[in-house]
Image (cartoon, grey):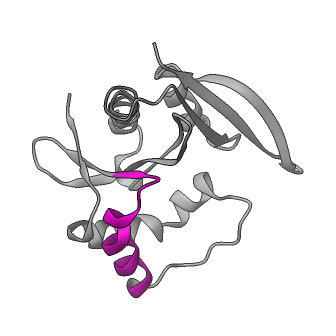
Amino acid sequence: MKTLLTDLNITHFDPYFEMVNSKVVHATTSPEEPFSAFTGVQIKEWLMGLSEKNNRKDFAILDKASKVFIGEVVLNEIKNNEANIRVALLPKFFNQGYGTEAIKMAADYGFSQMNLKKITLSVYGNNPGGLRVYEKCGFKKDTRNKINEGLYIIGMSLVSK
């Protein structure tokens, strides 16, 4: 394992700010929405308030050896022993295995520490790399919904063993 998960917080401000304002990341996480950059104040307030939120668990993904920020993985919308998961990486860390390890680690945490029974996610059809990662992690396709001409979203889920 080359990946470490830790609580996402204000110490990750600079690389987190870069990641959430990346047009490359936006293209795979919110392609139906027009790109709009977040301000430093918005990011600072978000990161400082995360510890107070009880319906989510936000992790920073770090390289285990160097402690360099890679991205985030989040278990959110937690309700009735189910949660949604999402992941975002800085583009320079795409296709290096970090996303796969982070998803597996966060799902394991959700099942073992949070007593989740099911984890769901949505992935856009224009993100074949993300789809491969989720399938590698054991997620199964549940739904496919057209957003607009040429864009669709796939719903996937993973159930506790």
Residue found 11% across the figure and 49% down from its top: 66
Q: Does the magenta stretch include residue 42?
A: yes
Query: Which is the main secondary structure of the residues drawn in magenta?
Result: helix
| 96 is higher (above) or lower (below) than 52 | above
Residue found 18% across the figure and 54% down from its top: 68
**In the shown orientation, is residue 34 left or right of residue 88?**
right
Q: Where is residue 139 in the image (x, y as percent from the top left)?
A: 56, 23
The picture quadrant where one finds residue 80 is: top right
| 62 is higher (above) or lower (below) than 139 | below
Residue found 52% across the figure and 29% down from its top: 134
How many numbered discs? 0
User: In this picture, which residue range is highlighted in magenta?
Assistant: 41-58
**In the shown orientation, is residue 32 left or right of residue 159?**
right
Q: Where is residue 128 in the image (x, y as percent from the top left)?
A: 61, 35
Residue 67 versus residue 157: which sits nearer the camera? 157
Q: Where is residue 100 in the image (x, y as percent from the top left)?
A: 39, 31
Residue found 14% across the figure and 51% down from its top: 67
| 137 is higher (above) or lower (below) than 38 | above
Q: Position of residue 107 (x, y in %)?
A: 41, 31
Q: Does the magenta stretch include residue 35?
A: no
The picture quadrant where one finds residue 39 is: bottom left
